[in-house]
Amino acid sequence: MRFEVSKVLDAIEQRLTTDPALARAVVDLAEVVRYADLDGGRPASLLRLGLVVDALATQLAEDNAAVYAVVHRGLLSDADLTSNERMVVRRWADDGLVEVLPTVGDRVLEVADLLGLPVLSRMRFEGVRERYGWLAGQAGRLMAPVSGKTGATLVAQVGGGAVPSIGSPDPVGAKILARLWRCPESNCANFGGGGGAFADLAPERRAGGQPPPTLHTGSPTCPRHSNPLSDIGPRPPAEALAVRVGGVIRRRFVVAEDTPVVVGRAPDKDGIMLGQWLTEEARRWISRNHVRFEMRGNEVVAQDVSTNGTGVRPGGSMDEAERMILKRQTRVLAPGDLIELYPGVHVGKAKTLTSAAPLNSVSVMAEAPTLSMRILER
């Protein structure tokens, strides 16, 4: 059973990020682990995060939807968690996959405000609604995880509906995220060189941009160490892209100035593998390494590296007369462009590409032992 739990926690780990380009919602982990009504189990369980992540993915119709988790430091030593769960949370903290704070305060709301993300919480936040007007004014920005027939489901606390909504990022946040910041603590996982017992694994576990600094002191500050951050220059150009297969967003990834990404059936290390979502015919057509994406200045460039060629749908048009073919050629992605590896297999800019079909995917909880996950019949 311990092995099965570890596999579930590993699956959940793949859905954690502090990268603003990849996060789809914000959660307070110390709150989520105590939603005992979701499984009828012990007072605190890290596996409940998996139920909430599954609910987010289902209701966004987006496979692999990731959450930005804020964690009170006390959770790292919480006796209601198992020793293995405490070790896992510490590893996530050391790797910069979650944001650990001495006091959470309204950090969940600050992150959501700066990035325009929904908050998954049962709290009403009555005392701060004037500061964060979207709490009461935007449907889908505050979603409560509650028990459903087969697990967790998300219910809007304001405005009704079942789909978490993305708002407009705070303009101040956009300016802050355009810069790189450095914490004087050399082992700061988010604004330093990384550290802790699992620091040697961090480069492989965590990729992407820095999280937003806290601005409660009036200037950019490290939320974990409360140190003023140094501005070390502009953030290198980067763009979040999304893969849509069969009408469903399957994966988001970031292409940065010094980090090109290859997408294909089963690409080399650090590439985006599509094989698990493809039909047999699509697997035969799509090359192992099919299309390469890179940043050139502020533009995303797609380069065909396949055997059969790569299609381009200008502006997302499905008109066959407008479809273009790249044969070892490159193209700068214009607004709305879709790169087509095979009919129904597309890559485009994440901010404009959305799912067009419901999600029917394997849950991160698929390996959960029944003794650990006793879903209540409703």
Image (tube, helix red, strand yellow):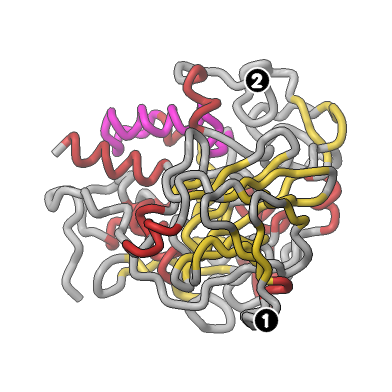
Q: Label 1: which residue?
A: 321
Q: Position of residue 69 (x, y in %)?
A: 52, 46
Q: Position of residue 68 (x, y in %)?
A: 55, 49
Q: Quadrant of the C terminus?
A: bottom left
* Distance CA(mark 1)–CA(mark 2): 51 Å
> Going by the image, does 242 lie left or right of 113?
left
69 in the magenta segment: no
Q: Secondary structure at mark 2?
A: loop
Q: Earlier in the sequence, mark 1 or mark 2?
A: 2
Q: Which mark is residue 69?
A: none
**At x 78% / y 45%, what residue is drawn?**
177
**At x 57% / y 44%, what residue is drawn?**
262
Rendering quarter of residue 318:
bottom right
Q: Which mark is residue 193?
A: 2
**At x 55% / y 26%, what residue is drawn?**
203
Q: Can I make out residue 30 in this image?
A: no
Instruction: Identify the magenta region.
Output: 77-101
| Nearer to us: label 1 or label 2 | 1
Q: Position of residue 162 (x, y in %)?
A: 48, 78
